Image: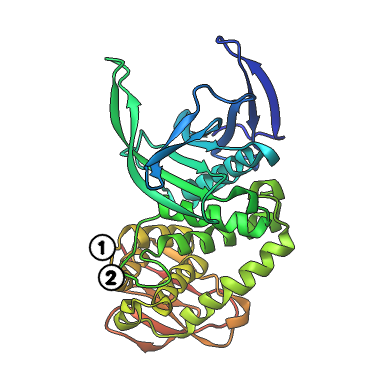
Amino acid sequence: MIAALILAHAFLAPRQDGTFWKKTLLNMPPKSSTALMYQGPVDPIEPPKLSPKKFGVDKIAWEFPWMVEGFSQTSEQGFQKCFRVFSQDNRGDKVSQVSQMLLRLWDFNYKNLRLVHSPKYNGGLVEVYLCFGGKAGGEQLFGVDTGMNLTTHRPVDVQVNTIYIYDMPSFTDPVEMAREVAHEYGHATLPPIGGYKAPEDWADGYLGEKLYLKWARDGLANGTLVSPDVMGVTTEALDRWVSTNVDPLIEKALITKPTPELLSDSSAEGMNSFIGLALSIDQVLGHAVFARSIKMNGSYDAKDYLAAAVLAVEEPDNIVLNIPKNLIGKYIWIPLGTGKLKGTTWNKHDPSGWVQILAKSGEISISNLH
């Protein structure tokens, strides 16, 4: 187990090339299995980093002279680079703020989902480009960049996992900043579910923003995170966002019978049905079951998630349900499969392995005989 970092600590360190780099170690909860840090030169890099994406009619790469690298450490290995964040401008130090939030999102993925960056893309790097220009918003792209073969010292093509955030001068509202970073990181790292026509083709971005910001809200509330970890957003503001954008989806998913037809809807309503269902699994059955369910989906089709959730709930020996207080006394739908209920009974049983149960007060659990 890695010793917890009691206080965030930033310091300057000289390097062999004569440049100075600022290194920041992030606060970690007691007995954390991970440690997080970011570092970068205090002066612009020379030459500037060129974006893999080419812009405009002339297909010109944009230059990014500011850089911060993010590192994560687990109990199994030392610090490993997992992010590089480039910026065209350093006013407001957004490059460090985005790096800090991304590291917290990496930590969510690792601890809650047992998910790490795919080594297929530049050895596990997610690279972020903070752009002065462009239309406000962001996008995530898998592409190709130019790297260097360390043996031959010749340029080689490298597959990259990139995030672009545009019009950084407009990037000022803390909640919107946190939402944008979480959305694009969801695209970059969560298993993809697609086939939608609205609001966009893939659901992993909207799932990411709602999942990560709910976890961030909980972290701010219990003191394991602080406002700078989430782009400076306050607990109250993030709680309002979650109450408006996350909690209603969870409630609707729990009281509505999930069907393949509901999840196959390619509209925004269909995407929200899938996202609400996924969020409800995490809420009621816990991170471990949710993590297994999204990894076991087996396809890009949301309707397959019904069977994946059943398979995931059948794995643990015992699961204690965490039912939202506002649903106590109501009937809700959960995956059960071959498991046995304790603390309540089911009202309706679907051949798919989902059941409607009465959400009573007191402990309700599912046990599996293995």
Percent x, y for residue 355?
A: 38, 82
Rendered position, 149 above or below 119:
above
The kind of residue tagged 2 is Asp
User: Is residue 214 left or right of 116 when viewed as pictured?
Assistant: right
Q: Which residue in the protein does label 2 denote? A: 304
Percent x, y for residue 123?
A: 36, 33
Residue 117 lies in what quarter of the image? top left
Q: Please indicate, yes or no, whether residue 74 appears anywhere in the rendered image.
A: no
Q: Nearer the viewer, residue 27 or 325?
A: 27
Rendered position, 282 above or below 191:
below
- For the N terminus, the quadrant is top right
Rendered position, 126 above or below 264:
above
User: Is residue 270 left or right of 27 when viewed as pictured?
Assistant: left
Point out which mark residue 299 bears. Answer: 1
The kind of residue tagged 1 is Ser
Residue 308 lies in what quarter of the image? bottom left
- For the C terminus, the quadrant is bottom left
Q: Nearer the viewer, residue 52 or 233?
A: 52
Circles 1 and 2 in contact, beta carbons < 8 Å: yes
How far is mark 1 from mark 2, CA to CA?
7 Å
